[in-house]
């Protein structure tokens, strides 16, 4: 495989499993030194680090709670101290909580934590990273098809967090364009082995039948879209939303 990211330093939030781990592996295969965060899966994070290092690339994991915005500046400082700079930020870490807006039994604490993690936490990391990102830098925010269309009930809060970070990323593209830093969104779709485990079976069935491709995606398929936006080939792409959700909006 060619290594278009040689000499680049990447930070992937939530790299211990799922799409984040697939993205860590792919960016490292393409030559980047990769830092990533996790919050509780220390063993899984170490396994990803070991796997990447075993292939001769560089990886490091930092425990950092995205729901606590005060941790963002120290995280970025740690990445810069470890790898000497930062070129690529992938905002992947997020959690999922569901509940219809009129449900008296909705777990509002879980919904509020999701807003803190998926929205405020992402913004705090973008703010901190934007101060150190080098020219030619990349910000890639992982959203969901629900960031632009809410196709099922019970997803208002999750969709709002994703829509919010999508708009924020567009603003970032405007702010950082003059420094030759791009900011783009990847709208991921349902993926094998991830949040779909928390999706009710009837919702999952309805969602899959609404997709053009009629199947779940593999994390590697979404990671490929992220890697494209991180690559030199995407140098003139900014403020864009790349749909990698099997045709949810087609
Ligand atoms: N899976 C899907 O079907 C799907 C569909 C559309 C969009 N997406 C989006 O794709 C992205 C990845 O989803 P996924 O299914 O791969 O997720 P996942 O398997 O649930 O993994 C989530 C990752 O985020 C980390 N994380 C969670 N809370 C955190 C916190 N407070 N601080 C720091 N890290 C935290 C987790 O760390 P720990 O391991 O330590 O908990 C883990 O590494 C998300 O942005 C999601 O919204 C997913």
Image: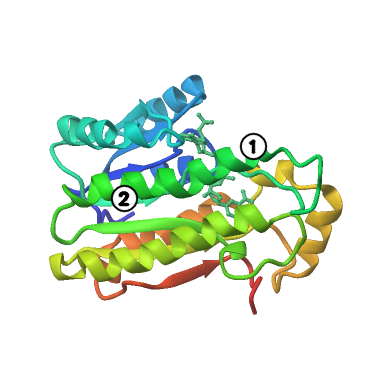
Cα–Cα span, label 1 and label 2: 23 Å
Question: Residue at position x 63%, y 68% from top?
Answer: 246
Question: Residue at position x 31%, y 43% from top?
Answer: 11
56 w.r.t. 123: above or below: above
> Residue 224: in sight, yes or no?
no
Question: Residue at position x 60%, y 65% from top?
Answer: 145
Please provide percent x and percent y for residue 39: 47, 28
Q: Which mark is residue 126?
A: 2
Towards the viewer: 191 or 169: 169
Does dot 2 land on a helix, a strand or a loop? helix
Q: Earlier in the sequence, mark 1 or mark 2?
A: 1
| 56 displayed left or right of 184 | left
Q: Residue furthest bottom?
A: 250
Q: Which mark is residue 9?
A: none
The quarter of the picture where the C terminus appears is bottom right
Quadrant of the rendered image containing residue 54: top left
Please provide percent x and percent y for residue 154: 75, 54
- The residue at which mark 1 appears reads as 110
| 218 displayed left or right of 101 | left
> Residue 62: in sight, yes or no?
yes
Q: Residue furthest right?
A: 202
Q: Nearer the viewer, mark 1 or mark 2?
A: 1
């Amino acid at each position: 495989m060619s290594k278009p990211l040689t000499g680049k330093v990447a930070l992937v939030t939530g790299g211990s499993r799922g799409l984040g781990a697939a993205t860590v592996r792919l960016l490292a295969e393409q030559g980047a030194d990769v830092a990533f965060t996790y919050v509780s899966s220390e063993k899984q994070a170490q396994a990803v680090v070991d796997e990447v290092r075993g292939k001769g690339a560089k990886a490091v994991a930092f425990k950092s709670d995205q729901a606590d915005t005060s941790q963002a500046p120290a995280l970025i400082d740690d990445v810069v101290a470890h790898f000497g700079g930062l070129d690529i930020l992938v905002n992947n870490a997020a959690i999922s909580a569901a509940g219809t807006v009129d449900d008296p039994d909705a777990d509002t604490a879980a919904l509020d934590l999701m807003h803190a993690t998926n929205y405020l936490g992402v913004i705090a990391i973008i703010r901190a990273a934007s101060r150190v990102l080098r020219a030619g830098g990349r910000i890639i925010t992982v959203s969901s098809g629900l960031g632009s269309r809410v196709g099922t009930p019970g997803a208002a809060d999750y969709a709002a967090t994703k829509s919010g970070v999508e708009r924020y990323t567009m603003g970032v593209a405007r702010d950082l364009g003059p420094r030759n830093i791009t900011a783009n969104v990847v709208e991921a779709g349902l993926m094998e082995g991830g949040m779909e485990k928390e999706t009710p079976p009837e919702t999952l069935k309805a969602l899959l039948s609404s997709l053009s491709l009629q199947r779940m995606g593999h994390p590697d398929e979404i990671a490929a879209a992220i890697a494209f936006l991180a690559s030199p080939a995407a140098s003139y792409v900014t403020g864009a939303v790349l749909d990698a959700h099997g045709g949810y909006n087609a």
